[in-house]
Image: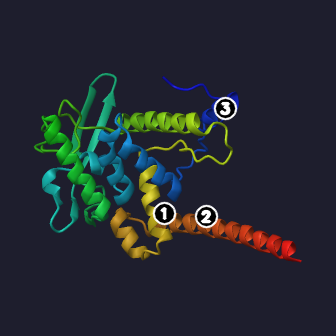
Amino acid sequence: MRNNISDNALKELKLIHNQDNGKKKALTKPGQDLFISYLKKSVQYEHWYPIFTIMAYTGMRVSEITGLRWCDIDMKKGMIDINHTLIYYKHRQNGCYYNVHTPKTKFGIRTIPMLSVVKEAFEKEKEFQESAEISCQVTIDGYTDFIFVNRFGNVHNQGTLNRAIKRIIRDCNQEILDNEGANKNVLLLPNFSCHSLRHTFATRMCEAGVNLKAMQDILGHADYTTTMNIYTDATQELKESEISELDEFLKKDKQEDSEDE
């Protein structure tokens, strides 16, 4: 049973859920760490940890990660082979169905090096499926053995994943507010989607100083300006953050000097 929290805390939680300015924004580093750590420790949501961790640390599109097969990853070499996408269609007359497509451009066909956290997430997914006796039960356009499947052995789609993220955000923030109350400095998860995780990885690469051409190749951008726009936004936010930290440091330094006089 949840603890009772103040009206201010509830208003703050509602505000977080209603954040949506139309622009897909990346999670901050603390926000990303909060999201991943919550998944890892949550009994209810730990089965979502592998797919969302891999999305957050590879920048893969939803259609790429949902269509990923075990034969597309090389754990020894630490490489992910992107060579097709899984597209979900929902029609009133024809119902719901999937198709496998080749990437729209040659830039979509690529290999992505695995970070250690990504390799660990793949291993965790395999262990979970073996213990739960879950395996892929579908064949789509001749493709099967998809990695990320539900308990019935069927593949996921963007709607399912985004709904899962919304529930995770809700319960993570509720847990924090239950513990912290209306503390205005408390870190909460903002409203975000699967695409935000792709943008988050691109932003982390920018912050780490990854070469722009390497970023373009890893993300599979056909247009260089797409990569450049992400880089420009990310570096601008980073500069603003660093200037803000410098301002706080100088204020603190000045205050200490005044106390010493």
Q: Is residue 118 left or right of residue 10?
A: left
Question: Quarter-wise, where is residue 232 in the image?
Answer: bottom right
In this view of the protein, which residue sits in the foreground, 200 or 251? 251
Q: Which mark is residue 246?
A: none
Q: Which mark is residue 203?
A: 1
Residues under numbered marks 1 and 3 in contact, where contact means CB atoms less than 8 Å apart:
no
Q: Are marks 2 and 1 in contact (CB under 8 Å)?
A: yes
Q: Residue at x 15, y 66 (%)?
A: 76
- Which amino acid does the dot numbered 2 rest on? Glu
Callout 3 touching callout 2 (CB < 8 Å): no
Q: Looking at the image, which residue is at 19% across and 29% down?
A: 152
Say if 35 sits above or below 16 in the image: below
Question: Can you tell which of label 3 and label 2 is closer to the viewer?
Answer: 3
Mark earlier in primary sequence (2, 1): 1
Specify which label sits upstream in the sequence, 3 or 2.
Answer: 3
Q: Quadrant of residue 177?
A: top right
Q: Residue at x 18, y 47 (%)?
A: 126
Q: Is residue 194 above or below residue 253?
A: above
Residue type of the residue flagged with mark 3: Lys
Q: Which residue is mark 2?
A: 237
Q: Which residue is mark 3?
A: 11
Mark 2 closeness class: few <14, some 14–19, many ≥20 residues within 10 Å: some
